[in-house]
Amino acid sequence: MNVNIKPDWHSNPLAALPEHIRGLIFDCDGTLVDTMPMHYRAWQTALGEAGIPLTEDEFYSLAGMPTLKIAQSLAQTHKSHVSGEQITHRKEEVYIQSIPDIEIIPAVVAIAQRENGRRHLAVASGGIHRIVDQQLRAAGLMDLFSIVICADDVEHGKPAPDSFLVAALRMGLKPEECAVYEDGDLGFQAAAAAGMSCVDVRPWYGLH
């Protein structure tokens, strides 16, 4: 037995989950799939063409927010002649080209694979179905998740709890019976607002 393994399931992907947790809800980008650098490059292209700067720190602080909302906010802040809708279309156009090269985050995917058939599984993403579904298929994960909630399924995106609450409802579970796996501050806020346990997966990057 590896004495370095911690029993706390919040900090150790190998730890057993508590019995009262009956459903697991996973964010997609930066949680199941290692796409955040790809998204940042696509944002740089789309925003650069519109004359709008975006630092890497600013980008990561917005993780989980719907793409259109980000684009509209930045366009308004920087008084761009390019609309948020146009920026969103261009960003997605650039990003889609990189989807075939997508890679999973092994430690997180291993949890979903281990719990498949034991617990209910769902995805709740700030992305739209057209992108998120392609990502899950490219990563070979679509069969794990019969429930995929995206920004176009809810009125309010993260940090509002809507996507997590809809996922719990679709799984037939109460919020307190669900655990969320996330990588972004807005997602953490959304999980707390939903009354769900939340695991920060960022310390697990690089684990296999």
Image (cartoon, helix red, strand yellow):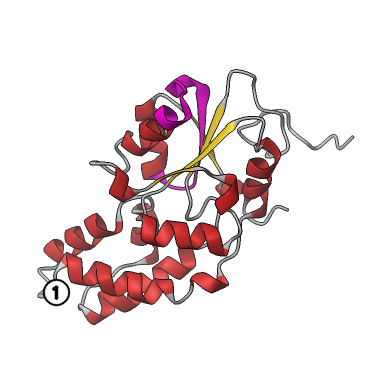
Q: Point out the residue furthest to the bottom here.
A: 49
Does residue 34 appear in the picture of this structure?
A: no
Name the quadrant containing residue 129. Answer: bottom left
118 or 51: nearer the viewer: 118
- The residue under label 1 is 82
| Residue 170 lies within the magenta run | yes
- Residue 52: percent from the left, percent from the top? 22, 73
Residue type of the residue flagged with mark 1: Val
- Residue 74: percent from the left, percent from the top? 20, 63
The residue lying at 80 percent from left, 37 percent from top is: 4
Q: Point out the residue furthest to the top here.
A: 20
In the displayed structure, does residue 10 sit left or right of residue 196? right
Which region is colored magenta? 168-185
Q: Point out the residue furthest to the right here.
A: 1
The residue lying at 47 percent from left, 20 percent from top is: 176
In the displayed structure, does residue 109 sit left or right of residue 48? right
- Residue 175: percent from the left, percent from the top? 43, 23
Does residue 145 appear in the picture of this structure?
A: yes
55 or 156: nearer the viewer: 156
* Quadrant location, the N terminus: top right
Instruction: Say which element carries label 1.
Output: loop
56 or 73: nearer the viewer: 73
Name the quadrant containing residue 93. Answer: bottom left
On screen, 6 above or below 175? Answer: below
The residue lying at 40 percent from left, 42 percent from top is: 187
| Residue 102 lies within the magenta run | no
- Residue 78: percent from the left, percent from the top? 14, 67
